[in-house]
Image (tube, rainbow, N blue to C red):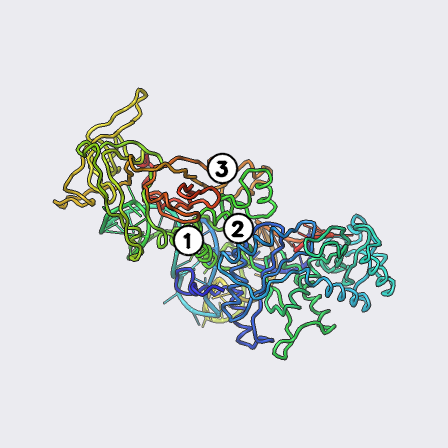
Amino acid sequence: MITDTDNAGGGSDTSRHFLRQWIADEVAAGLPGGQVVTRFPPEPNGWLHIGHAKAVCIDFGMAREFGGVCNLRMDDTNPSKESDDYVQAIQADIRWLGFEWDRFVYASDYFESMYAMAEELIRRGHAYVCDLTQEQWKAYRGVPTQPGTPSPCRDRNPDESLALFRRMRAGAFADATLCLRAKIDMASPNIHFRDPVLYRIMRVAHYRSGDAWCLYPMYDFAHPIEDAIEGVTHSLCTLEFEVHRPLYDWVIDRMDELGLLITRCGQTVRPRQREFARLSLTYTVMSKRKLLQLVQEKHVDGWDDPRLPTLAGLRRRGYTPEAIRDFCERIGVSKYESETELALLEYCVRDDLNRQAQRRLAVLDPVKVVVENFPDDGETWFDAINNPEDPASASRLIPFSRELWIERDDFMENPSNKFFRLAPGREVRLRYACLFTCTSVVKDDAGRVVEIRGTYDPQSGGGTAPDGRKVKGTIHWVSARHARPVEVRLYDRLFTVADPLADETRDFITWLNPDSIRTVTAQAEPALMGAVAGERFQFERLGYFCADTRSSQPGAPVFNRTVTLKDSRVNAVKG
RNA sequence: UGCCUCAUGGUGUAACGGUAGCACAGCAGAUUCUGAAUCUGCUUGUCUAGGUUCAAAUCCUAGUGAGGCAACCA
């Protein structure tokens, strides 16, 4: 459990969202069992994304806040889609996010108990084996506006159902030929009450239980049982499960009748489910299916591509767990299906990195500067503070020499007076170093500036003029002789439109941003070469960058741009 | 269409019958050796129509709009 972000959100009061209130009210009223128990139940069929992070923060966060515990449970009841690779990735992501579970369990741990309960439901007339095909069942089930018709098997003798069910388990039938149904209400306006399937035959090896089973429970049957066995008090999930809640309660009621609910502190623990809206973010997609498609069709380079909203992708991009937790607190929790602006996530990571990241100088689009009054072979080292937000971060030395690289768009030949960087006849400060005045430019045949020449003020060492004259512009630079070329990947939003799914007539793939990654060779100050994989920096005046964990080599880091610095320069002035 | 759910500035969220607040975004200014950060200020909101009440974002009714459900997926 995290301990350092009790007031995450950077704001004043923690939001009194409806789940927090619900749990608080119950705790105040004397929660049966005496302890809040939640669970995070991912299906191990994909990687966790920022939407899951919201759920993780809620599930683990509510437990922590109320002095309870949260279990991590792999909801692995459909072996056709699940694998252990995903289990490992999910665990790693949750730990990275900063949470620790009380118990780590698998739904498949409970298969035997679930089966036993199913037999009991059959004996008591609450379930029956049905031999209708899926196609036939469509007709029997009916439509929402009209009641369904009972399956011909509905009144099958329990003994007969039981015998059949055992043969199903023994593997006597082919896939999808028989299933076990709850006997509830074929006329219910809630489709989920019209004799829902409890077990289906599926001859697929399970990644954990192997071929021990050819019969697997459905979510609606399995989930409440899992919760009840673990003594979960608050089962929190997303909105689409709202209509499943009566069925969830039905299963819990049956368990109660059978005396299967656990007791804690002498009291029966009855799990209850509540639902909240899932996270939706602009300029990306969140569904596992679509993320899988992006990965499989190679629009991105794997589940941890830094352009993806997966936790692994965000991590590689340079996002911190603190920033993501802060974000999850700030977005709040409600039942309104909203769309959160990517700008908020970016704000959160900037806010965190501004405090955490050391500053470095690097030039992404270099143009040569010659300091005419500085000796050919001379060099000077200037002191540069590592992080002005962190007094403990000390400083480092950066080399200065006659030839420098500066950012191409920090120079303008014919600037307006709103441009206060370098131009002919203008003086700027070279960050940490000195004041420099441009006196001439050299162009190639095409008229492109290839060299900027000028002089520095020898009295301005460190960047302060002795006469106290004001210099409006400060630009970053690196010494050409000392600079090291370094690969930098400039990431941008994955899609060109805020909601790539809005237009249902158009494939969302066509909205992919062709410039979502641009790779450049930057010129970096020497200190950057020692960056270790995963280390984050602010490249001054540019943005936050993270040494890539896949491509970086010792002494040869590759940087991913996490996010640019906020830029209030008006468009007309931009280079 | 049947059932369920939701609706507060551009975005997200709070206000629990009693002054509509906060954050992000945007805009303006101060400050600044990062056009960053920081600080100050500003613009913009209760879906509609009725009703209950001294008083309604809040309670009731109807409407409108959005989402979910009709897998042997979760």
Left/right of residue A220 with respect to residue A178 in the rendered view: left
* Disc 2 target residue: A280
Q: Residues within 10 Å of mark 3 (few under 14, many from 20)?
A: some
Question: Residue A150, can we see it?
Answer: no
* Disc 3 target residue: A513
Mark 1 on the same chain as mark 3: yes
Left/right of residue A252 with respect to residue A567 in the rendered view: right
Q: Secondary structure at mark 3?
A: loop
Q: Chain of mark 1?
A: A
What residue is at 51 percent from the left and 71 percent from the top? Answer: A67
Q: Of all residues shown, which one is farthest toward the left?
A: A467
Q: Position of residue A410 (x, y in %)?
A: 29, 36
Q: Position of residue A174 (x, y in %)?
A: 82, 50
* Disc 1 target residue: A348
The tag earlier along the polypeptide, 1 or 3, is: 1
Q: Position of residue A417 (x, y in %)?
A: 23, 36
What residue is at 71 percent from the left and 70 percent from the top? Answer: A255
Q: Secondary structure at mark 1?
A: helix
Q: Secondary structure at mark 2?
A: loop
Q: Viewer-proximal residue, A546 or A525? A: A525
Q: Is residue A500 above or below residue A212?
A: above
Residue type at tag 1 = Cys
Q: Quadrant of the C terminus of chain A?
A: top left
Q: Chain of mark 2?
A: A
Q: Position of residue A141 (x, y in %)?
A: 77, 54
Residue type at tag 3 = Asn
Left/right of residue A575 with respect to residue A470 in the rendered view: right
